[in-house]
Amino acid sequence: MEALRFQVVGEAFKKKPLDVKTPSERLRVGDGTSGMRPAKYFGSKVFNREKMYKYLPKDVYEKMIDVMDRSGSARSQGENGARLDRETADAVAAGMKQWATENGVTHYTHWFQPLTEGTAEKHDSFIEHDGKGGMVEEFTGKLLVQQEPDASSFPSGGIRSTFEARGYSAWDPTSPVFIIDDTLCIPTVFISYTGEALDYKAPLLRALHAVNVAATEVCHYFDPSVKKVTSNLGWEQEYFLVDEGLYSARPDLLLTGRTLMGHDSAKNQQMDDHYFGAIPERVAAFMRELEIVALELGIPCKTRHNEVAPNQFELAPIFEETNLAVDHNMLLMSVMKRVARKHGFRVLLHEKPFAGINGSGKHNNWSLSTDNGVLLHAPGKTAEQNLRFATFIVETLMGVYRHNGLLKASIMSATNAHRLSANEAPPAIISSFLGKQVSELLDHIEKAIAYHDTVEPKLDEIRYQIDKLELIVDDSLWPLPKYRELLFIR
């Protein structure tokens, strides 16, 4: 094993960065795409609103936009909301199929997130019997909207018996369809026959709806025109890259995704010189290709840099609506693994793959905004705007205080618990750091409330007695200005 390790170390030093071609270089010469910038190929493999406008009839496009934009808003007002009928679904499926086949797609899949901390997909081709001994390509609204994958082998939390295997995947129209290789991927929820969630997306959508309803009601105290409150998320994905040869020489990495034995490195992260340092050439090539693939899939990658630990790096996108941001993070982790192997790496997404150095966190930068463009966790320029800001800060703090157990449970996977409880941060403590100015603001509000609740009632008692004295004491003997004199009445 020792000889093998030194051999693969030597081979790793000989490897050169791969030549990464941009989309314009991959296309045929003379098509006018030379010098294509990221903005040109962003979302090229996503059936986004631009593609909908091109491939759907005008009335169908308008219905789809209504379904997407009114998701949650009308229901929060007690209405039924925009619904997708069968005729519209058939028209959408036809447009999707046309776009997909023009891009070389032959299969489709309902892409969902079971309780395995990964994604799942079952690919079906478009072909069907034509009744004449041949085949025809077909994709209907029924196939788009719902499917029935076998759920017996997916985790269910013990809510049902194994023989109750039926599970349903249902299309989430608020998260756009995308293409991976020759497959049309349709984001879906995954639920049981009796409606229990068998995935992570369904609870997330329910939570987002609950936040929307509650926050919209609070907003109406300040602006009755608000119809919807959206949760926004900007995640940061940290990860390690290990040369594939070195990875294969470690059975613990192969089997568990982390090291279980061995000595610390002679140099770890003591000097913090890896953090924000120059990105190694092979890693930079990997990052370039990863960003190209991600941008084509509509993932708005913004930042890349070295992290604190050796061979640790980070990627962060621009913030998006939370449901879409989570889908993009799940998709990106899958893409990272594929691109890394192409460059001779294995990507480690385990929260604590090595002892003695930092683990990999997934920081979530979260906020709420209204449908008319107001960021609810940002201070304003007027007293009313700042009162709204303070209201939502306090509401958030109370949510953390009352539901801290739920917050802990949401991040207490076995792998993350290994990073937090044993090494880097105590998970039993959830704190809120507000900064000096916001803390002082809330202190002043607390003092004002205390004044209103304690001092003002006492003053009212004193005033009641003084008012009675004022009526029985002669004006010449009364030492204070009387109430009628304060009002300039003689």
Image: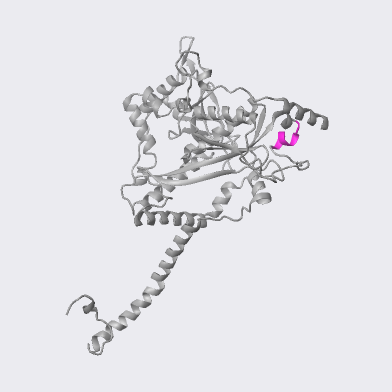
Residue 108 relative to residue 277: left or right: left
Q: How many marks?
A: 0
Residue that lies at the very extreme toward the top in this rendered image: 133
Most frequent secondary structure within the magenta stretch: helix
Specify how the rendered protein is coloured: one colour
Closest to the observer, 466 or 183: 466
Q: Quadrant of the N terminus?
A: top right
Relative horizontal placement of residue 187, taking residue 409 as reference (left or right): left
Residue 473 sits in quarter: bottom left
Task: Give the vertical position of 343 relative to 302 (above or below).
Answer: above
Q: Percent from the top left, x then y, of residue 417? A: 64, 48
Q: Residue 37, how many percent across, how many down?
A: 47, 25
254 drawn magenta: yes
Q: Nearer the viewer, residue 113 or 418?
A: 418
Q: Quadrant of the C terminus?
A: bottom left
Residue bounds of the magenta highlight: 249-256
Q: Quadrant of residue 445?
A: bottom left
**Is there any visible trace of residue 142 in the rendered image?**
yes
Is residue 401 rendered to the left or right of residue 428?
left
Q: Position of residue 429 (x, y in %)?
A: 59, 56
Could you say which is closer to the camera, residue 172 or residue 370?
370
Residue 381 included in the magenta stretch of the image: no
Q: To which quarter of the image does residue 453 belong? A: bottom left
Q: Is residue 268 above or below residue 142?
A: below
Whether residue 155 can be seen here: no
Q: Where residue 49 sits: x, y (%)?
A: 39, 29
